[in-house]
Image (cartoon, rainbow, N blue to C red):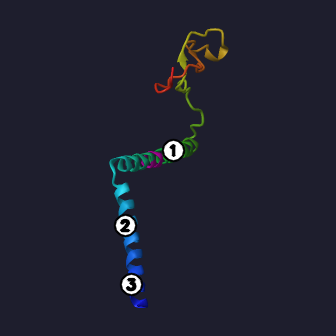
Amino acid sequence: MFRRTFWFTAGAAAGVWATTKVNRKLKQLTPESLAAQAADKALAAGHRLKDFALDVRDGMAQREAELDEALGLNAHPELPAPRGFAAIENSNDPRYSKNPTYVERSTYSYNRNEDH
């Protein structure tokens, strides 16, 4: 009698466990879940790529500094204005005397997804 009860309980537990496992796997394979997983992996890959690019940029700057020091080229030529400057006339500011068409970034948002 106890043997039958034991095997019945073990079978019921195995059935519940297997059903739970199958239902979890089916939820993972729905189109919404697959799309979310793909988006997460794409974001992670993008972050890894960005980190790699930043490491390469740092290495390039370090190597350039080493080469400049080795060749005695410590004076860098004038670099162009950084990105993010708006093209607006500003001839009063001495910082922009060489190129009076650049001023600091305005407060206007260029985010297309922003609610207006």
How far is disc 2 from disc 3 in space, using C-alphas?
18 Å
Identity of the amino acid at label 2?
A: Thr
Q: Classify mark 3: residues with Cα within 10 Å, few (<14), some (14-19) or many (20+).
A: few
Residue at 42% from the left image edge and 75% from the top image edge: 13
Q: Which mark is residue 7?
A: 3
Identity of the amino acid at label 3?
A: Trp
How far is disc 1 from disc 3 in space, using C-alphas?
61 Å
Tell me which numbered mark, 1 or 3, is placed earlier along the sequence: 3
Residue 51 picture location, percent across and down? 50, 47
Identity of the amino acid at label 1?
A: Leu
Residue 36 picture location, percent across and down? 40, 47
The question of residue 94 being in magenta is answered with no
Magenta span: chief secondary structure: helix
Residue 82 picture location, percent across and down? 54, 26
> For mark 2, what is the residue?
19
Q: Classify mark 2: residues with Cα within 10 Å, few (<14), some (14-19) or many (20+).
A: few
Q: Nearer the viewer, mark 2 or mark 3?
A: 3
> For mark 1, what is the residue?
54
Mark 3 element type: helix
Q: Quadrant of residue 101?
A: top right
Q: Classify mark 1: residues with Cα within 10 Å, few (<14), some (14-19) or many (20+).
A: few
Tell me which numbered mark, 2 or 3, is placed earlier along the sequence: 3
Q: Which mark is residue 45?
A: none
The answer to whether the residue labelled 1 contacts the one labelled 2, judged by CB atoms less than 8 Å apart, is no
How far is disc 1 from disc 2 in space, using C-alphas?
47 Å
Q: Is residue 85 left or right of residue 29?
A: right
Residue at 60% from the left image edge and 10% from the top image edge: 90
Q: Which span of residues is magenta-colored?
A: 44-48
Judge whether 41 appears above or below 94 on screen: below
